[in-house]
Every structure is written in structure tokens, then in C-alpha cells.
Image (tube, rainbow, N blue to C red):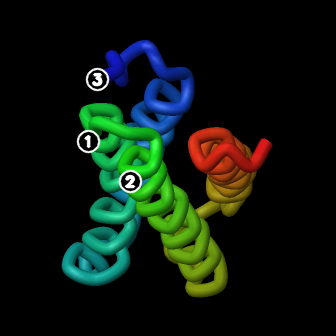
Amino acid sequence: MQDFRKLDIYRRAIKYCVNIYDLSTRFPKDEKYGLVSQIRRAVSSIPLNVSEGAGCGSNKEFSQFVSYAYRSCNEVLTCLELAMRLDLHKGNGEINELEKEGIELSRMLYAFLKKLDGST
């Protein structure tokens, strides 16, 4: 078992999760059970899967959970694109920054996944 709190990817995922939650509080109230709920479930899944995977007994098992985290990160990016296209947040600059942060996190997750799989 690894101490997931020491993983840079986990710390980045937690920070990203907090930032997305903060953004989603400013979405229209009628999106509470729509995009707000979806983006929050997806973004919280990222650090949750990294931490759960760190408790696995092998890199193969761990990589499965990192794969889930990677896919959830892509889901968040899609939610951000929808939020921009639907103009759910005044001033899309913040969404653009979170999109950049999400792309970087996605790249980190993918690289970590390949490392666990022994592909690098």
C-alpha cells in the first residue's frame, strides 16, 4: 500500500476538485440536479479513485483505478465545455483556466497509468 497523500497526482486532483466545486456553486440554480451534480460526481471521482487504487496490492490493480480517474477527468472536461457552450457562468475565463488545469491533470493521469502498466 502506498500513502496516496504523498502522490503529487492526488494532491493536484484534490485541488482541482475544490476549484470545480467552487465554480459550480455559481452555476444557475436550475442546474443543481443537472450539470452541477454531474461535474461534481465526476471531479470527486478523480482523487477518490487514485486513493482507492493506492490501496491495491499490485500495479495492475492500481492502474485500473487510475484509468477510472483518467476517464472521470475527461468527463469533467466535457462538462466544462458544455458549461461554456451553454453560457452557464459569466466570464468564461475561469472555465478556460480550469479546462487547462484539467488537461494537465489528464496528461498526468495518463502518464502515471502508463508507468503503472510498465509502458514507459
Q: CA distance from mark 3 to mark 1?
A: 10 Å
Q: Kindly indicate the quadrant of the structure image that contains residue 86.
A: bottom right
* Residue type (three-letter) at the residue carrying disc 3: Met
Please state the horizontal and vertical placement of residue 30, each as a whole percent of the image: 26, 82
Which of labels 3 and 1 is toward the front?
A: 3
The N terminus, quarter of image: top left
Q: The residue tagged with tag 3: helix, strand or loop?
A: loop
Q: Which residue is mark 3?
A: 1
Please state the horizontal and vertical placement of residue 33, each as a whole percent of the image: 20, 79
From this viewpoint, which residue is outermost toward the left? 33
> Do tag 3 and tag 1 residues touch (Cβ < 8 Å)?
no
Q: Is residue 4 in sight in this rendering? A: yes
The C terminus, quarter of image: top right
Left or right side of 119 for 32? left
Q: Nearer the viewer, residue 50 or 42?
A: 50
Q: The residue tagged with tag 2: helix, strand or loop?
A: helix
Image disc number at residue 101: none
